[in-house]
Amino acid sequence: MPRCLLRFCLPIKIESPACGRRLEQEMIAQKEKERAPRNRTIELSEQEIEIYRKRLIYSENDVSDCRNRIICADAFETLKRLPENSFDLIIADPPYNLTKNFGENSFRQISVEDYEIWLDSWLKETVRLLKQKASVYICGDWRSSSAIQRIGTKYFTLRNRITWEREKGRGARANWKNASEDIWFFTVSDDYVFNAENVLIKRRVLAPYTENGKAKDWEKSAAGNFRLTSASNLWTDLTVPFWSMPENTSHPTQKPEKLLAKIILASSNENDLILDPFNGSGTTAVVAKKLNRNFVGIERNETYCLLAEKRLALTEKDKTIQGFSDGIFWERNSLNSISRKGAKKIKRIG
Ligand SMILES: C[S@@+](CC[C@H](N)C(=O)[O-])C[C@H]1O[C@@H](n2cnc3c(N)ncnc32)[C@H](O)[C@@H]1O
C-alpha cells in the first residue's frame, strides 16, 4: 500500500496467541447469548475454531499451492506472491470509501483521489495473475463507484456497470435513501467468457399476452404465470443476508450468495479458478464451491476467515443457493410461493 495511505488503515494484524485467546473468549460469550429460535446466524464453537485454524494459510506460509484455500493475510502482500496467469475470474469486494470497522481493523473514509490511489495499489497487482479470457468484477457504493471505473479502465476493458438494489436502506432527512450499490464488470481482452443463458430470471407475468389463444413467451402454472427473461444490469431480486437466513454471519458487509452466483455463472465455467482478494466471510469461495468452481480467498481478519471455513464445510451437506433453483434465478419471494403451493416444476421456455 502506498505510504501516504497507511494512516487511513490501521496496521495489518494476524492474531497473536493473546489475540487468539481473546477471540475464543468472545466467541464463547457470543454463543452463550440468547438466540432467537429462528436465528440461523453461523457461529463458531471453540472446537471449530481449532479445526478451521488448521485449514487456513497464514502470511508466513507458502502460497504456491493455494487452490481452494483461504489465505489469512494482507491482500497487498499476498497478491504479489500468487502464481501468474492462473485466474479465470476476480471478484473484489473491497472496503468501500466509508469509515467502517472490520473486526479489529478499520477503514477510514478518504478523499476520492486517495481512494483511487488505494484501489490502484492493489488492482495493478492483479493484472499478471489473470488469464487472457478472464473477467474482473469490483463492488462499490455510489461514492466510490466513479473511482472504480477510472482505475479499472486503466488496466482492463470496461464492459458494464451493474446496479443492485439492497432492498433495505437507511433513510436520510436531507438526501435520497441509499438503497443501491454498483458492481463494475471488466475483462482482460475482447475474448471472454459470458454465459448469458445461465443467468436467466423467472418473472411473474402481470399482463399475460396471448396470440391465437396461446401464451406468448410465458407459461401458466399452478403458482401463477411466469416468463424467463435475460438478466439486465439492474438487479432487484436480491436480499442482503439477515439473521434468519442460513448463510448469515456476523460479518458487517456480507454479500448475498445469490449475487455471487449470478457473477460466477455468467463469467466462469466449471473447474475455473476464482480469486477474491477481500474474502470477508467467504461468500465468493462458498458459491464457487457450490457451483463446482475452484477458489482462492484472501482476508486479513482471522474470525472472518474461520467463518468462511465453516461455511465451506457446511456446503458439504447443503449446496442450495437461496433464490436459485433448477438453473433459474427467481424473482424475490416468488420461489417461496411456488414451494408452498407445491407446484410442479415450471418448464423452461425461450
Ligand atoms: C466489503 S468486505 C467483503 C465482504 C465479503 N464479500 C463477504 O461477502 O463477506 C471487505 C473485507 O476486506 C477485508 N480487508 C480489508 N483490507 C484488507 C487487506 N489489506 N487485506 C485483506 N483483507 C482486507 C476486511 O476485513 C473485510 O472483511
Image (tube, rainbow, N blue to C red):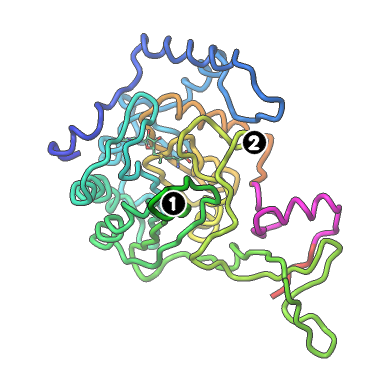
| Residue 129 lies in the magenta-colored region | no
Label 1 sits on residue: 178
Q: Which residues are magenta?
A: 322-345
Report x, y in % for residue 58.
Answer: 36, 25
- Of mark 1 and mark 2, the one earlier in the sequence is 1
Label 2 sits on residue: 246
Q: Quadrant of the C terminus?
A: bottom right
| Quadrant housing residue 244 | top right
Q: Is residue 259 left or right of residue 347?
A: left
Give me the C-alpha separation between circle 1 and circle 2: 26 Å
| Residue 327 lies in the magenta-colored region | yes
Q: Residue furthest bottom?
A: 212
Q: Residue furthest left?
A: 4
Tell me the kind of residue under disc 2: Pro
Report x, y in % for residue 51.
Answer: 53, 18
Category of crowding for the residue at label 2, using alpha-carbon neighbours closer than 10 angstroms: few (below 14), some (14–19), many (at least 20): some
| Quadrant housing residue 195 | bottom right
